[in-house]
Amino acid sequence: MKQTAVVTAGTAGIGLETALGLAEAGLAVTLVGRDGERGARAVERINGTAPAHSARFLAADLASLGAVRALAGRIAADGPLTVLVNNVGAMFADRQESVDGIEATFAVNHLSPYLLTELLLPVLRAGSPSRIVNVTSGAVGVAKRVFDAVEPPGGYYGFHWYGRAKLANLAYTLELAERLDGTGVSVFAADPGGAATDMTNGTMTDPKIVSPGLRLLWPLVRRKFERSTSGPASLAARSSIFAATDGSLAGRTGVVIGPQAHPVAPFRAAADPRVAEAVRRLSERLAPVTTA
């Protein structure tokens, strides 16, 4: 049976480098993104490497839960799925809302991959042994850990809210791994570390994305940040490619793969069952898997 992979936000940066790695490993890769021209260029680049299977592009705005549902239907219609890499991520300097009226950081970084994953579980089970890889971030360390509502108390600071959404997704990842244990579907988180991408070279250079206390240290923080995000996206993609393909992970699940492409301990708050339960309740309310 042909092995297949889906990579969200796969038309540039870390997502494209991940897709290239999966294609090199022999998987038939589907790239998901918003921009058709970018998608065509990414497919051309992958197919230019003479992979075993041609790549393809599917257009979807993953900030929209309706678009996520439609995308899941298109992917599921193709049959069994071997690898799902939820690489989508976004950070905003100013507060924004999605088309569903949900704060955009939480919608894109958690609800979108959560809903897509849940909707694709049947085809991932059919494709077992299969893997789900959710891309996480070191920004979880600056996150508020309250998930009674979409938005935490206090002012909006993009970096902290990004970290909170990634923490929600990491907690979901570890809970999902436990839920699917023994089904043939393994679940991993991959931390790419730093890389020079559109997000790191754009939004993350704006000091207002961090709380006022951290802004006082911004010159030092930024210098450290610039050193840690100056590497190529191909290097940052190693953790996702390892999580998706490496044979040493066969039969394992619930593992976090660090920037050096080896297992690391998960962030403690993500393994807290109270955090996981709060995230589950909030996710099910905002993005129900069934619409009945």
Image (cartoon, rainbow, N blue to C red):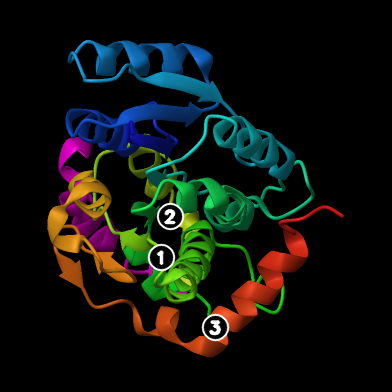
On whether residue 274 falls in the magenta region, the answer is: no
Whichever of labels 1 and 2 marks the residue nearer the N terminus, that label is 2
What residue type is disc 3 on? Val
Residue positioned 47% across, 11% down in the render: 37
Mark 2 vs mark 3, foreground winner is 3
What residue type is disc 1 on? Arg
Residue positioned 43% across, 78% down in the render: 270
Whichever of labels 2 and 3 marks the residue nearer the N terminus, that label is 2
Query: In the depicted view, which residue is nearer to us: 257 or 79?
Result: 79
Q: Which residue is mark 2?
A: 207
Q: How many marks?
A: 3
Query: In the depicted view, which residue is nearer to us: 108 or 261?
Result: 261
Residue positioned 21% across, 19% down in the render: 51
Vertical relation: 35 (above or below) 169? above
Q: Which residue is mark 3?
A: 275
- Residue 254 in picture, x, y percent from top left: 34, 71
Residue at mark 1 to residue at mark 2: CA–CA distance = 6 Å
Circle 2 residues within 10 Å: few <14, some 14–19, many ≥20:
many
* Element under disc 2: helix
Q: Which residue is mark 1?
A: 215
Whichever of labels 1 and 3 marks the residue nearer the N terminus, that label is 1
Mark 1 and mark 2 residues within 8 Å of each other at the beta carbon:
yes
Magenta stretch? Answer: 213-236
Extreme-front residue of the structure: 1
Query: In the depicted view, which residue is nearer to us: 221 or 265?
Result: 265
Residue 286 appears left or right of 267: right
